[in-house]
């Protein structure tokens, strides 16, 4: 009987091995070789799924997007309106080891897209993730009863920039930009917008 | 007569060659080889000043810090208070080609520090640049007549995160996060803090 290769299961196994390497040693350590070793496969088998370093980074980024989407979808909106919005935003901010690893992948991915000219596919992917977060910010603000004179476009852009800036600062100086500080700043920001 | 090597002049020449390469081809294109070619020197002569890629990136980052400091020092405070603060903040935001190249260097530098474990020297340098900008935000806010109940520490952190977030967005989607949008958002942010 011919050997049936279940590609979905294989992808899932690679994703898990990749994630263990990223969490333990950082995104820079993730290579076809290290992931193959982690998964107990040959480098050739891993390379079938991502032929090069750029493909591997895209695969890692897809994984991050999937994780964030799953967490956001699973949230149950309860509590006061600002707390609900805050809980959604927290899903994309590096507040624990898991989200820190996700943010590091995004950072490496984005920096690579910026540094390479003509990296069209990378850029399209970065744009997609960027647009998704902007839309999330806009939807969340629309769910709040905002002050009458606020410009929704401007406030969505401002909130989006604040979220990404705080994430960046949490990555650069985690001992200063703690989860508590981030929640404090974001809650204050949201409450100042409420009617 | 022995040949006198003027190290300061040489460093300046390398800095200029490095900057031409970064502006034209991006920070990823900057290597000992490409900079030597640009300056019309041997790779060995360039390597004397920065022995490896990390040293080169540090050199580029020093150059960015120097440029920002020069621009900030040269500013003449005039106009309404929010406009003055805005003019200072604009010196670190990628609003034109020159500052975009500077931001790309910072981004590459910071992403490398994040991605590499044990990159102590890189980290110290990233911390320094980060702290400088936070102090600038704090001093600028202190120069304004703010609302009585505002917490200066929180507002400095919020402004700093907003500035870095907007810079990041200007780098990711320059056609959307334009200089006009950034000025509009920052002016609104500052005016909401005024007494």
Image: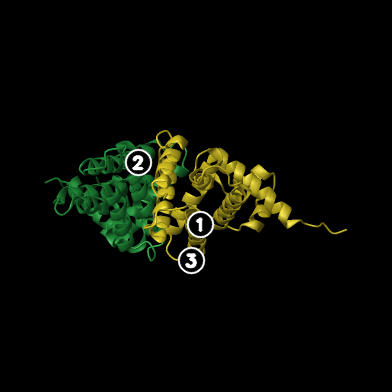
Chain colours: A yellow, B green
- Answer with the quarter of the image where residue A55 lies: bottom right
The local crowd at label 2, few if under 14, some if 14 to 19, many if 20 or more residues have their Cα within 10 Å, is many
Residue lying at the far right of the rendered structure: A1
- Same chain for mark 3 and mark 1? The answer is yes
The local crowd at label 3, few if under 14, some if 14 to 19, many if 20 or more residues have their Cα within 10 Å, is few
Q: Which residue corresponds to the image point at 42% horizontal and 52% vertical from the top-left?
A: A159
The residue beneath circle 1 is: A139
Q: Position of residue A90 (x, y in %)?
A: 51, 44
A67 vs B10, nearest the viewer: A67
> Cβ–Cβ below 8 Å for labels 2 and 3?
no
A157 vs A28, nearest the viewer: A157
The residue beneath circle 3 is: A120
Question: In whole angstroms, how far apart are the C-alphas of marks 1 and 2?
Answer: 25 Å
B66 vs A169, nearest the viewer: A169
Q: Position of residue B47 (x, y in %)?
A: 32, 48
- Answer with the quarter of the image where residue A59 lies: bottom right
For residue B37, say whether it is visible: no
């Amino acid at each position: 009987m011919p050997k049936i290769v279940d590609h979905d299961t294989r992808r899932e196994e690679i994703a898990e091995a990749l994630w263990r390497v990223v969490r333990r040693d950082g995104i820079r350590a993730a290579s076809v070789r290290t992931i193959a070793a982690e998964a107990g496969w040959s480098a050739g088998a891993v390379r079938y799924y991502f032929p090069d370093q750029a493909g591997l980074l895209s695969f890692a980024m897809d994984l991050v997007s999937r994780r964030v989407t799953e967490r956001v979808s699973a949230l149950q909106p309860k509590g006061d309106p600002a707390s609900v919005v805050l809980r959604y935003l927290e899903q994309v901010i590096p507040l624990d080891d898991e989200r820190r690893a996700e943010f590091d992948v995004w950072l490496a991915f984005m920096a690579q897209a910026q540094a390479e000219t003509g990296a069209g596919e990378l850029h399209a992917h970065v744009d997609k993730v960027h647009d998704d977060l902007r839309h999330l910010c806009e939807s969340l603000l629309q769910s709040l009863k905002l002050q009458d004179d606020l410009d929704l476009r401007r406030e969505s852009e401002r909130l989006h920039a604040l979220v990404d800036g705080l994430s960046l600062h949490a990555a650069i100086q985690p001992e200063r930009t703690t989860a508590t500080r981030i929640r404090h700043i974001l809650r204050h920001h949201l409450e100042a917008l409420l009617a």
